[in-house]
Amino acid sequence: MIKMGDISKHIHEHLYNRSKKLYVEEARIGLGYVGVLLEGDRPGLSALLRNELPPGCGVFSKAGTLAGSDASEILDLLVNGKNPLEKALGLATANAMIGPDIAEEPERDSIALMTLSPTDRVAMVGYFGPLVERIRKTGANLHIIEKDPKRMEIPEGKNINRILEKCSVAIITATSILNNTIEEILNGLGNPRHVTIMGPSTPMLGEAFAQTPVTHLSGSAILDPRKIMQIISEGGGTPNMRPFLRFIERRIKRIKRLEET
């Protein structure tokens, strides 16, 4: 059983010593994303779950203090943050530290790597619009699990727990790290052959997922740090950033559930 917050703790543990040697050059908070630029032109981003911010959270109390601070202080927010904005800053900082490790990796098509067929049952946790039609064209049975009821696609008579338990492929949004739902989702899986954490926010750190059912990480490498920071500041989202990102995929080699260790 994976405990709530374990994934964030594992990311923090693997990066903390490195973070003490770095400082923050810039931090940007936009409408859909948060960006952190560390010294040496190391950018990282994270989606911002604005709809899950607490009422009255209209300003950021730490504004004016982030630039020039130790990266370790912002990374701490990944585990100690009190709301999705603070946790997003922590995740963006983690991604900025991971960035140099993935900078040269080639772009890969995550859906092609899944080799989907009509025998597959796909659970998509979080709505990835551009992928929906591609998945359906393979003949795979797709169920979309989303907080937005307009995007939720679960046939009558079925429930979320049953879909997670029976799926052969799971595509899970990286934003589930920010609202502490990722552990519950992973615990609910049966025995899928392919489990991907997906989205530009994905921390490409296999060690943090080695004791989970996750088999692949599907994230992004930033090609133009300054342009990405500009787009975030101007309220842009994934479509605006896409020309300046390279979507990449990593397979996690060692997979063990926590209860097996």
Image: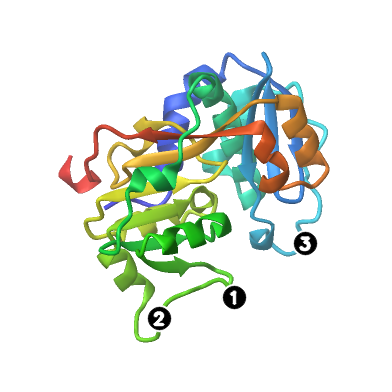
Q: Position of residue 252 (x, y in %)?
A: 31, 34
Q: Amino acid at mark 1?
A: Lys
Q: Which residue is mark 2?
A: 155
Q: Secondary structure at mark 2?
A: loop
> In the displayed structure, would residue 87 be above or below residue 20?
below
> In the displayed structure, would residue 251 be above or below residue 59?
above
| Chosen colour scheme | rainbow
Q: Which residue is mark 3?
A: 56
Tell me, yes or no, if residue 99 can be seen here.
yes
Bin the neighbour count of mark 3 within 10 Å (Cα to Cα): few under 14, some 14-19, many 20 and up.
few
- What is the quadrant of residue 125 in the picture? bottom left
- The number of numbered discs placed on residues in the rendered structure image is 3
Q: Amino acid at mark 2?
A: Pro
Residue 101 relative to residue 188: left or right: right
Q: Which residue is at the far bottom?
A: 157
Seen at 41% across and 42% down, the residue is 7
Given contact means CB atoms under 8 Å apart, are the residues at marks 2 and 3 in contact?
no
The CA distance from mark 1 to mark 2 is 14 Å
- Give the mark toward the camera: 2 or 3: 2
Seen at 66% across and 50% down, the residue is 48
- Give the mark toward the camera: 3 or 1: 1
Seen at 46% across and 67% down, the residue is 144
Q: Which residue is mark 1?
A: 150
Q: Quadrant of the C terminus?
A: top left
